[in-house]
């Protein structure tokens, strides 16, 4: 029997993995520019950022969207939002 592959690009990707990969790719400073939240800008840590993202839907959505864009085109330069 053939299993169907999910079309959801986030299927099977944990928030921790997503954040770890993005920080490795862009660094905390760039993450803070792209998603303006304090936990990325002031004393960033994986633990505090995960706690914030888990309880703040809009911020989590921003990080998820950034991850999907990066996975679709990993060679692209970071885009800046104003």
Image (cartoon, rainbow, N blue to C red):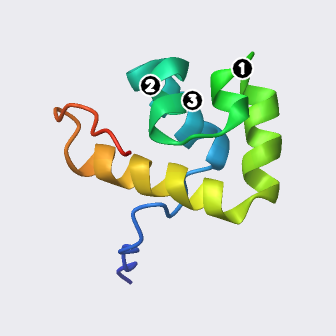
Numbered mark located on residue 42 in the image: 1
In the displayed image of the protein, which residue is found farthest to the front? 82
How far apart are the two marked residues, 1 and 3, measured between alpha carbons? 17 Å
| Point 45% across, 39% down: residue | 34
- How busy is the neighbourhood of tag 1: few (under 14 within 10 Å), some, or many (20 plus)? few
Count up the numbered dots.
3
Disc 3 to disc 2, C-alpha distance:
13 Å
Q: Residue at x 31, y 43 (%)?
A: 70
- Dot 2, crowdedness within 10 Å: few (<14), some or many (≥20)? some
Instruction: Identify the element where label 3 is drawn.
Output: helix
Can residue 14 be seen in the rendering of this structure?
yes
Residue with the mark numbered 2: 30
- Is 66 displayed left or right of 58 in the figure? left
Image check: 8 left or right of 54?
A: left
**Mark 1 vs 3, N-terminal side:** 3
75 versus 3 height, above or below: above
Q: Compute the Cα span from label 1 to label 2.
A: 12 Å
Which comes before the other along the chain, label 3 or label 2? 3
Q: Residue at x 20, y 31 (%)?
A: 77
Q: Quadrant of residue 56?
A: bottom right
The disc, 1 or 2, on the residue closer to the chain's N-terminal end is 2
Q: Residue 20 carries which label?
A: 3
Circle 1 sits in a helix, a strand or a loop, which is it? loop
Quadrant of the image occupied by residue 60:
bottom right
Left or right: residue 16 versus residue 25 is right
Where the C terminus falls, by quadrant? top left
Nearest-to-viewer mark from 3 and 2:
2
Residue 75 position in % (x across, y down): 16, 32
The image shows residue 64 at horizontal and vertical percentages of 50, 55
Would you say 1 lies left or right of 36 here? Answer: left
Depth-wise, is mark 1 or mark 3 nearer the camera? 1
**Residue 4, how many percent across, how many down?**
37, 80
């Amino acid at each position: 029997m053939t299993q169907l592959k999910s079309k959801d690009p986030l299927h099977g990707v944990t928030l921790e993995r997503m954040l770890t990969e993005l920080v490795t790719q862009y660094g905390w400073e760039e993450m803070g520019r792209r998603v303006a939240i304090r936990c990325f800008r002031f004393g960033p840590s994986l633990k505090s950022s995960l706690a914030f993202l888990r309880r703040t839907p809009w911020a989590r959505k921003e990080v998820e969207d950034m991850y999907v864009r990066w996975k679709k085109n990993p060679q692209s330069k970071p885009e800046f939002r104003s």
